[in-house]
Image (cartoon, grey):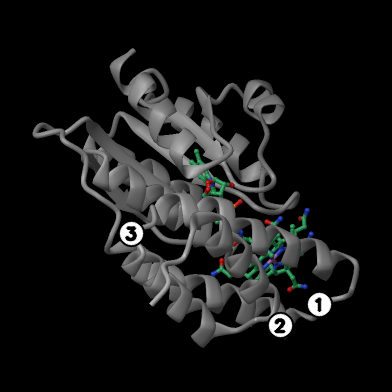
Amino acid sequence: MATLTMKEAKQKAIDIVLAIDEEGSAALAQEALDSGLDPVELLQEGFTVGMRRAGELFEAEEMSLPEMIIAADAMLAAFDILEKAIPEGQETESLGTVVIGTIEGDVHDIGKTIVGTLLGVSGFDVHDLGRDVAISEFVRVVKETGANLVGSSALMTTTMVGQQKLEDALAEAGLRDKVKTMVGGAAATQHWADKIGADVYAESATEAVQRAKEAASA
Ligand code: B12
């Protein structure tokens, strides 16, 4: 059987997400692994690109909400398979403790989950609080775990303000100088991070890992 190239796999991933083909998505993920392709590169440069295009189609009213839900399920079906093949880092000691979650009022959790997974295999102890997480819950878990990093994801203009509230709540709890804050998700930008005083912004999961390592050792 001919093996799949990364270029073909990326294009197929985009097409499959846009064709909202859940079964095809899982089959492609398996075929990519069988062909020895890098699961993280395929997630970021294939499936994620497809999801962003789906968002553009939704905004242009060319994709319905139910279709966007199935597109997300298609990506998750691939993630379930690819995740197990992400190689563990070489670190024998923990690089630090990270608390991560999606801001209150926001149910988008695919990107946050990928970031949390990649931080975990890279050597961090990760506490993933899930999605639609109250600011007080982030603060409580940061305190309880003594985390040195806290990451929040926001995909909507209506929920990104929660990332600012988190900065304020950590300061009020006397924790802001003990923990580095990381923001991400489609709504966040470097400009936004600077504006609210977050320590780290990252656009992708691999960048998030690199910047988290820098922040943890600074
Ligand atoms: C899939 C999706 C959904 C799915 C979510 C399923 C799920 N379990 O997550 C469903 C169908 C449920 C959904 C619902 C809605 N959605 Co929606 N959705 C999307 C879509 C198409 C893709 C998001 C995604 O999964 N991308 C793939 C992942 C891998 O990428 P990512 O999230 O960007 O994550 C990467 C980076 O951002 C970064 N990162 C992410 N988090 C973090 C955190 C940290 C700390 C760091 C450092 C980095 C980082 O690393 C990740 C991996 O590389 C986006 C379009 C877009 N441009 O994002 C719209 C989008 C976010 N949705 C949108 C909207 C409007 C909605 C709804 C309100 C629709 C409705 N009418 O009900 C609801 C919201 C409900 C709610 N209260 O939250 C809008 C938001 C508009 C805005 N500006 O506010 C968007 C932008 C679409 C659009 N263009 O109109 N949605």
User: Seen from this angle, which residue lies furthest right?
Assistant: 60
Q: Of circles 3 and 1, which is in front?
A: 3
- Above or below, comparing residue 80 to residue 148 in the picture: below
Mark 3 residue type: Gly
Q: Residue furthest top?
A: 218
Q: Mark 2 and mark 1: span between their CA atoms? A: 6 Å
Residue 142 x/y as whole percent:
32, 39
**Which residue position is annotated with label 3?**
36
The residue labelled by disc 2 is 67
Which residue is situated farthest in the left direction here?
A: 92
Give the camera-side residue of 213 and 50: 50
Amino acid carrying mark 1 in the image: Met
Residue beneath disc 1: 63
Assign ligand 1 to one image quadrant: bottom right
Name the residue rendered at 35%, 47% in the picture.
118
What is the spatial separation of the Cα atoms under label 3 and label 1, in whole angstroms? 33 Å
- Residue 143 x, y percent position in the rendering: 29, 37
Disc 2 to disc 1: CB gap under 8 Å: yes
Q: Distance between the residues labelled 2 and 3?
A: 31 Å
